């Protein structure tokens, strides 16, 4: 594994996409890879976007991750 891949992997495990529920980018990406291809499916699988802000802060980030996966970017 290349160094930049390792760094990206570490950052995914540390970066919180859903701040309210402390859901990491790694957890969301894994759910997407496992078939959660809509915001509602990601919410159901991870609990993201179900906190006190109801997705106000993370909805667009999650949708971007779904789009990136559909485009083969991860």
Image (cartoon, helix red, strand yellow):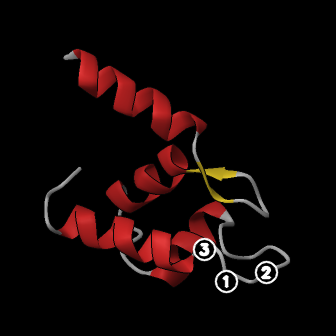
The crowding category of the residue bearing disc 1, from other C-alpha atoms within 10 Å (few below 14, some 14 to 19, many at least 20), is: few
- SS at mark 1? loop
Quadrant of res 1: top left
Quadrant of res 21: bottom right
Question: In the picture shown, does residue 52 fall above or below 9?
Answer: below
State the separation of the CA atoms marked 3 and 1: 13 Å
The residue closer to the viewer here, 63 or 32, is 63
Residue 56 in the image, given as x and y percentages of width and height? 67, 83
Question: In the picture shown, does residue 2 fall above or below 59?
Answer: above
State the separation of the CA atoms marked 2 and 1: 5 Å
Asked if marks 3 and 2 touch (Cβ < 8 Å), the reply is no
- SS at mark 3? helix
Numbered mark located on residue 68 in the image: none
Residue in the picture at 79% in, 64% down: 20
Relative to 57, 3 lies left or right:
left
Residue in the picture at 19% in, 69% down: 70
Q: Which residue is mark 1?
A: 56
Question: In the picture shown, does residue 23 fall above or below 41?
Answer: above
The crowding category of the residue bearing disc 2, from other C-alpha atoms within 10 Å (few below 14, some 14 to 19, many at least 20), is: few
Residue in the picture at 54% in, 35% down: 13
Residue 24 in the image, given as x and y percentages of width and height? 59, 48
Of callouts 3 and 2, the N-terminal one: 3
Relative to 69, 61 lies left or right:
right
- SS at mark 2? loop
Relative to 49, 12 lies left or right:
left
Residue 68 in the image, given as x and y percentages of width and height? 25, 64
Q: Which residue is mark 3?
A: 43
Q: Which residue is mark 2?
A: 53
Asked if marks 2 and 1 touch (Cβ < 8 Å), the reply is yes
């Amino acid at each position: 594994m290349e160094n930049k891949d390792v760094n990206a992997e570490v950052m995914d495990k540390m970066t919180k996409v859903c701040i309210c529920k402390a859901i990491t980018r790694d957890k969301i990406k894994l759910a997407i890879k496992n078939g959660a291809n809509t915001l509602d499916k990601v919410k159901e699988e991870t609990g993201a976007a179900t906190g006190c802000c109801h997705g106000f802060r993370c909805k667009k980030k999650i949708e971007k991750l779904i789009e990136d996966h559909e485009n083969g970017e991860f």
